[in-house]
Image (cartoon, grey):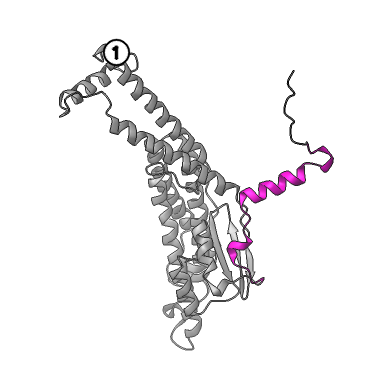
């Protein structure tokens, strides 16, 4: 478990600005490490529940939690050290305006802290639901799921064939003794006149899931190949953060209320940790950006027009990679002997 440094000097100054009691050296670091240790326990419990393929993602989320928590705490100490409390400074000539700014900064820092604590929920849910498209190993996990479904489909067909041939499931090498007994009980309780080990609807449903997973693999693969492009607009710029899988809008200054409302309606949320309005990087996010006049590219094009589709990008790359003199003509049909 990696711990990130806590600014003890800033923690001491923050304490002196709000209390007459002495600061206990190392207390901020101890508080930070206790929180990280608690998060590490959550991560270990989750890793014990899920497939090992999810362990790397859990470790990554834990490291992100530890890093962001240290940054948030250090920033909080810096904010608290800006202006003393009225109890320390006294009411005479108290810097009210500076205190108001400090309170606003503190509220934003607390909101960021809540967002960081939300990473614990992400750790608890990792491996428990569907496979997210922003998972770096999404294609690999989907491929494993597809292989499992295809294996199940083949086994169900072969078990049914064995039953048709022998009229019993006894000694079927494809099934364990427990599985044989469960299938026998299920068939005995069936309302059908001629029950089968695996009914047609089970094969149909499994086959539909195979088709869905194949389509999902194709979709995620194409998305991974897509070259997203950011742009500049009047008053800021947009970045396509592939690492965090976010479309991020950075304004040069604080946008007005109408712009903030427009962004919220379009699914963007303010992220104090990065200083940007953002949403998950998807085709829907690009389409939402197309409708936002406040972030219209300076070129006048729509954001979607700036994105290079994978098929076009591949064609260009292949064209450039193959020297003109080495391009092969279409193969001629073999002459009859």
* Residue for point 61% across, 62% down: 305
For residue 187, which quarter of the picture? Answer: top left
Visible in this render: residue 304?
Answer: yes
Identify whether 220 is placed above or below 229.
above
Residue range in magenta is 299-328
For residue 178, which quarter of the picture? Answer: top left
Identify whether 78 is placed above or below 313.
below
**Residue 137's spot in the image, x, y percent?**
52, 41
Please name the residue that numbered disc 1 is placed on.
165
- Spot the residue most to the bottom: 93
Identify whether 219 is placed above or below 29.
above
Compare residues 99 and 55 and report the one nearer the observer: 55
Compare residues 261 and 315 and report the one nearer the observer: 315
Label 1 Cα neighbours within 10 Å, binned few <14 / some 14-19 / many ≥20: few
Q: Is residue 262 left or right of residue 178?
A: right
- Spot the residue most to the right: 325
**Residue 152's spot in the image, x, y percent?**
37, 27
Q: Is residue 321 magenta?
A: yes
Q: Is residue 320 left or right of residue 156?
A: right
* Residue for point 58% across, 62% down: 304
* Quadrant including the C terminus: top right
Q: Is residue 147 magenta?
A: no
Q: Is residue 167 left or right of residue 51?
A: left
**Residue 102's spot in the image, x, y percent?**
48, 76
* Residue for point 51% across, 80% down: 256
Identify whether 278 is placed above or below 312.
below
**Residue 61's spot in the image, x, y percent?**
48, 48
SS majority, magenta: helix
Total numbered circles: 1
Q: Secondary structure at mark 1?
A: helix
Compare residues 143 and 209 and report the one nearer the observer: 209
């Amino acid at each position: 478990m990696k711990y990130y440094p806590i600014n003890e000097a800033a923690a001491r100054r923050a304490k002196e600005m709000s209390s007459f009691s002495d600061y206990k050296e190392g207390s901020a670091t101890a508080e930070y490490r206790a929180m990280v240790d608690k998060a590490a326990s959550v991560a270990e419990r989750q890793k014990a529940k899920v497939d090992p393929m999810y362990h790397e993602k859990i470790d990554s989320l834990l490291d992100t939690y530890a890093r962001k928590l240290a940054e948030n705490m250090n920033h909080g100490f810096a904010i608290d050290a800006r202006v003393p409390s009225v109890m320390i400074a006294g009411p005479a000539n108290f810097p009210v305006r500076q205190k108001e700014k400090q309170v606003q900064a503190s509220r934003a820092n607390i909101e960021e802290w809540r967002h960081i604590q939300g990473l614990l929920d992400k750790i608890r849910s990792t491996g428990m639901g569907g496979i997210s498209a922003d998972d770096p190993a999404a294609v690999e996990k989907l491929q494993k799921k597809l292989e499992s479904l295809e294996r199940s489909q083949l086994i169900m067909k072969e078990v049914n064939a064995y039953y048709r041939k022998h009229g019993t499931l006894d000694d079927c090498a494809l099934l364990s003794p427990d599985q044989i007994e469960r299938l026998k009980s299920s068939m005995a309780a069936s309302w059908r006149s001629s029950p089968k080990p695996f009914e047609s609807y089970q094969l149909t449903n499994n086959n539909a899931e195979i088709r869905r997973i194949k389509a999902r693999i194709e979709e995620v693969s194409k998305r991974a190949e897509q070259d997203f492009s950011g742009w500049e607009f009047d008053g800021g710029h947009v970045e396509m953060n592939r690492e965090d899988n976010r479309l991020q809008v950075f304004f040069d200054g604080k946008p007005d209320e109408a712009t903030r409302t427009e962004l919220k309606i379009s699914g963007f949320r303010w992220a104090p940790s990065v200083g940007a309005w953002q949403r998950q990087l998807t085709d829907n996010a690009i389409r939402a950006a197309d409708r936002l006049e406040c972030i219209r590219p300076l070129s006048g094009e729509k954001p979607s027009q700036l994105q290079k589709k994978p098929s076009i990008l591949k064609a260009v790359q292949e064209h450039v990679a193959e020297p003109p003199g080495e391009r092969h003509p279409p193969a001629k049909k073999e002459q009859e002997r």
